[in-house]
């Protein structure tokens, strides 16, 4: 598994407008090949939003970086100050603690 943690700030829209955008974006993310799970995150008081992405492999993440969805979101004028951190999974522990939780 490969994990990416993305954060950004909103520009020119408020959280309510962003919530509506999330509703329209979520179905597209549900179809991304190799994306095991995406957790949409926010810290309203600081104005920080983003996601935790769990990929089947680093290659799946790299393919996503070439997708139209990624290009549209990462260059959207209402989403600024992108920060991305990437992590390899440690299966020695993840296999014991059940990995990605499901709601």
Image (cartoon, rainbow, N blue to C red):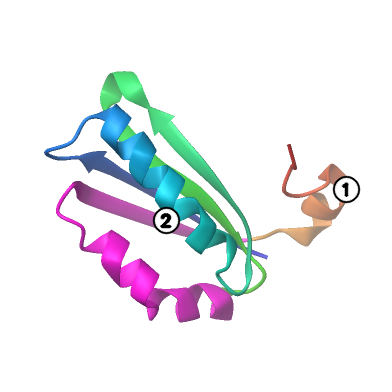
Q: Position of residue 53 (x, y in %)?
A: 54, 55
Distance between mark 2 and mark 1 Cα atoms = 24 Å
Front residue of 5 and 71: 71
Mark 2 or mark 1: which comes first in sequence? 2
Q: In the displayed structure, would residue 8 be above or below residue 92? A: above
Q: Position of residue 73 (x, y in %)?
A: 30, 60
Task: Let me know if residue 6 appears in the view.
Answer: yes
Kindly state the secondary structure of the residue where label 1 is placed: helix
Q: In the displayed structure, would residue 56 be above or below residue 47? A: below
Disc 2 + disc 1, Cβ < 8 Å? no
Q: Which residue is drawn at 56% across and 81% down?
A: 59
Q: Quadrant of residue 21?
A: top left
Q: What residue sits right under mark 1 in the picture?
A: 96
Q: In the displayed structure, would residue 69 be above or below residue 87? A: below
Q: Give the number of the disc on residue 81.
A: none
Front residue of 27 and 54: 27
Q: What residue sits right under mark 2 in the picture?
A: 85
Residue 9 among those drawn in magenta: no
Horizontal side, residue 7 vs residue 80: left or right: right
Residue 72 among those drawn in magenta: yes
Q: Quadrant of residue 89?
A: bottom right
Quadrant location, the C terminus: top right
Q: Where is residue 3 in the image (x, y as percent from the top left)?
A: 57, 58
Q: How crowded is mark 2: few (under 14 residues within 10 Å), some or many (20 or more)?
A: few
Horizontal side, residue 99 vs residue 79: left or right: right
Kindly state the secondary structure of the residue where label 2 is placed: strand
Query: What residue span does the magenta drawing correspond to?
Result: 59-88
Q: In the displayed structure, would residue 26 be above or below residue 18? A: below
């Amino acid at each position: 598994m490969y994990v990416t943690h993305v954060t950004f700030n909103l520009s020119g829209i408020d959280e309510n407008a962003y919530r509506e955008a999330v509703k329209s974006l979520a179905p597209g993310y549900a179809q991304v090949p190799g994306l095991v799970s995406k957790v949409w995150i926010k810290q309203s008081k600081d104005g920080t939003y983003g996601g935790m992405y769990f990929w089947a492999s680093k290659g799946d993440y790299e393919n996503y970086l070439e997708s139209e969805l990624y290009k549209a979101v990462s260059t959207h004028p209402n989403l600024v100050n992108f920060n991305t951190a990437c992590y390899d999974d440690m299966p020695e522990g993840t296999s014991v603690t059940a990995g990605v939780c499901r709601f």
